[in-house]
Image: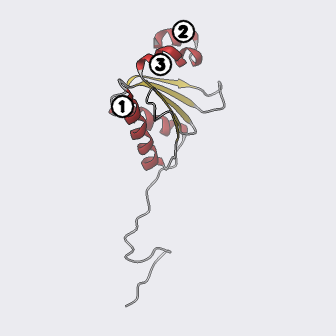
Amino acid sequence: MSLTSTAGTPANSGIRAMSVQAPNADSTLAAVLKSLDENKAEDIVQIDLRGKSEMGDYMVIASGRSTRQVGALAEKLTDTLKQTFGILSKVEGKASGDWVLIDTGDVIVHVFRPEVREFYQLEKMWLNPGEAAEAT
């Protein structure tokens, strides 16, 4: 018995190629916002960094109600980005659960416990004065 293959794919191998869309900043932002919203993040704010910083195109700041929820939001978001776009995000702070930073390349995501978010007030640092007043 011989197995033949076409187009370089082994016949009957049972291996499927993962369908991954090519990400861009806007599609990554949309996926981040959708994941945070579906997983019950609170007070989600998006900040356009284009022209303000070279570190990314967008920043998203959100809150979780507890350390457990902050960690879960970060984990679900990184899993979604990996499955949808093949993005392997850099994650900092997940072990403590107070403030998790997720760097996707184009979108920087901060997930805070409310008290920690209030202390650092990142929105005020990155938003224009009128926008910062609306975000609080």
Q: CA distance from mark 2 to mark 1?
A: 33 Å
For the residue pair 14 and 122, the one nearer the viewer reads as 122
Quarter of the figure that contains the C terminus: top left
Instruction: Name the residue at 44% across, 35% down.
Output: 32
Q: Is residue 73 visible?
A: yes
**Which residue type does callout 3 highlight?**
Arg
Query: Please, what secondary structure does the residue beneath circle 3 have?
Result: helix
Q: Is residue 123 above or below residue 59?
A: above
Instruction: Name the residue at 37% across, 91% down.
Output: 1
The residue that mark 1 highlights is 68
The residue that mark 3 highlights is 117
Q: CA distance from mark 1 to mark 3?
A: 16 Å
The residue that mark 2 highlights is 130
Residue 56: x %, y % from top left:
60, 33
**Which residue type does callout 2 highlight?**
Gly
Query: Please, what secondary structure does the residue beneath circle 1 have?
Result: helix
Badge 1 or badge 3: first in the primary sequence = 1
Q: CA distance from mark 3 to mark 2?
A: 19 Å
For the residue pair 66 and 45, the one nearer the viewer reads as 66
Residue 40: x %, y % from top left:
33, 29
Horizontal arrangement in the rendering, residue 92 relative to residue 39 (left or right): right
Horizontal arrangement in the rendering, residue 113 relative to residue 59 (left or right): left
